[in-house]
Amino acid sequence: MTNRLINILILMNFSCLSWTSLGQNSSTKNNIQHLTHNQIGETIFDLKQKYEQQISQKDTLSALYTLNQLGQVYSQQAQYANASNYLWEALILADAIQDLNAIATIHEDIGWLYCFYLRKDEAFKYYNSTISIRKKLVRKKEISSKEMVSAYYNMVILHRELGEYENCKSYLDSCYQIMYASADKDLKVNNYILTEQALLNINTKKYEEGINQIHQVLPWFEEKAPSYLIVLFKELGDAYQIQKQYDLSINYYNKALHLSQTYENHKNYVPLIYDELTKVYTETGDCEKALSCLSKAKQTNEELFDSRSLNNKSLLELTDNFKNEKLIQKERAQNQKLKQLEHEANIRFYRNILLLGMIGFLLIFGFALLRFIKVKHRTEKELAQKKRDIERSKNLDIIDLKNKELTTNALQLVEKEKLLKELKSILFDSKKEVEKSELKKIFKKLTNNSNNYWKEFEMRLVEVNEDFYKVLKSNYPDLTPGELKMCAFVRLNYSSKEIANLLGIGVESVHSLRYRLRKKMGLERNDNLFEHLFSIEESKTE
């Protein structure tokens, strides 16, 4: 690895050519789809030999392309550690010669690696980088807008795998817009996009439409990219499984597994297929096959993705070679800059002293300003509190005065009632003949006046204590009008006897009313009802 990196650094000085990576990249991926297991081994051997020749010939552009091809081949074989090593080497070289299109393509392939592990943030980071770079190149007219389809297509797949179907549809629409705007309709791209449309329909429960669309593109993939049938057969198996057509589902899953063994491709789908077969055999009652598929799913999943797998351990513990090289270059540049700027050390020193002085002054000024603001705020707060206390005191005095007036009126009414009763008793019990009709008129008038006085008393009682009633009703909405009146009398500190006279009931009835009030208010035996009502009055005035 170290020798290869050194050779790459040598090549950096001999090329500044551009690399039309997308066309080469797409062609390479298409060719890989046709390779069988034996052909893949031969291809890897040939690519490595070709890379060594290009290094010796200082052919930077071709070496970069070959490294990218090796990364793609290993990625298709699920040898993600090897794939990542070659892709990072290619990225170092592409960054050195500042070939933005090559960088975009390599970022795309690195995004694929993270996509396999469903490492969402990293995958989005590299896919978004690809989109950003290619947009700039399109604006500069260095590449065709058609090359954006590949970048959006990757986002379609990632969002579909993550179950984010609205985002998937959005990027799919972007692909269609570019394709329809282009005069050159690339059939291969169209079929891949149509396939993703079909898979999106299946995943959003439009099964019949999605299945029909897949069957429409199957002949093209059988001829042009047979290993991609692994993906299509797996999705067909899923669709038929959901529709409980288990025979068809098993048939397509087995076809997918057979093609995966034949082409040694799309291995990341193998554990998923075995998982789905486990579900199907469980549903059909074939426990033996279900157990076998479950075991195979676990084994293949550990081989491909588990951190204990030797094949992928280095990927999960990946040290970013590109970043390491950039850090080395940055360190060298910093050392050179330090040597050039040594004679300016004194100027920097005095500048820092001045800066520190300014910072100190600003800190002191800021502290003083903050203290002034705090003191001002505290003073304003105290003045506002005093004003509230004065207003509250005035209000309490006014209410107290009015309550005293009400008390006086109430006592006068009680005395009047007593006087009326005594007068009635004297007159009706008297042996002296009196015109009864005249007496009735007098007592009716007196009684009506008395009732009017009581109504006026109750009205003034409610008016004076309106806020108290509002708080009381808010805290205890189930209190009856009689219980509310009882609360007002208790708050005015009337005795039970006085309340009995005012309400025209017995003292025992007053005690019963007090007991029901305490129970509704959730008061304990030791709690004072008057103090509790007074605390409500206090909370109202605050």
Image (cartoon, rainbow, N blue to C red):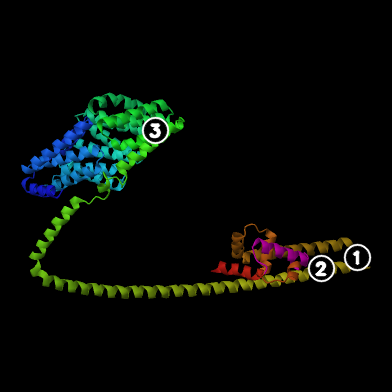
Which element carries disc 2, helix, strand or loop?
A: helix
Which element carries disc 3, helix, strand or loop?
A: helix
| Residue at 33% from the left image edge and 39% from the top image edge | 300
Q: Nearer the viewer, mark 1 or mark 2?
A: 2
Circle nearer the N terminus (2, 3): 3
Left or right: residue 283 versus residue 163 is: right
User: x and y percent of residue 513 in the render?
Assistant: 72, 63
Q: Disc 3 marks which residue?
A: 277
Cα–Cα gap, marks 1 and 3: 112 Å
Q: Nearer the viewer, residue 45 or 78?
A: 45
Principal secondary structure, stretch drawn in magenta: helix
Q: Amino acid at mark 2?
A: Leu
Residue 382 quadrant: bottom left
Say whether residue 506 is magenta: yes
Residue 434, disc = 1
| Residue at 11% from the left image edge and 38% from the top image edge | 50
The answer to whether residue 305 shows anywhere in this view is yes
Question: Could you classify mark 3 by the number of other residues whose Cα lies within 10 Å: few (under 14), some (14-19), or many (20 or more)?
Answer: many
Which element carries disc 1, helix, strand or loop?
A: loop
Say whether residue 489 is magenta: no
User: x and y percent of residue 173 in the render?
Assistant: 29, 35
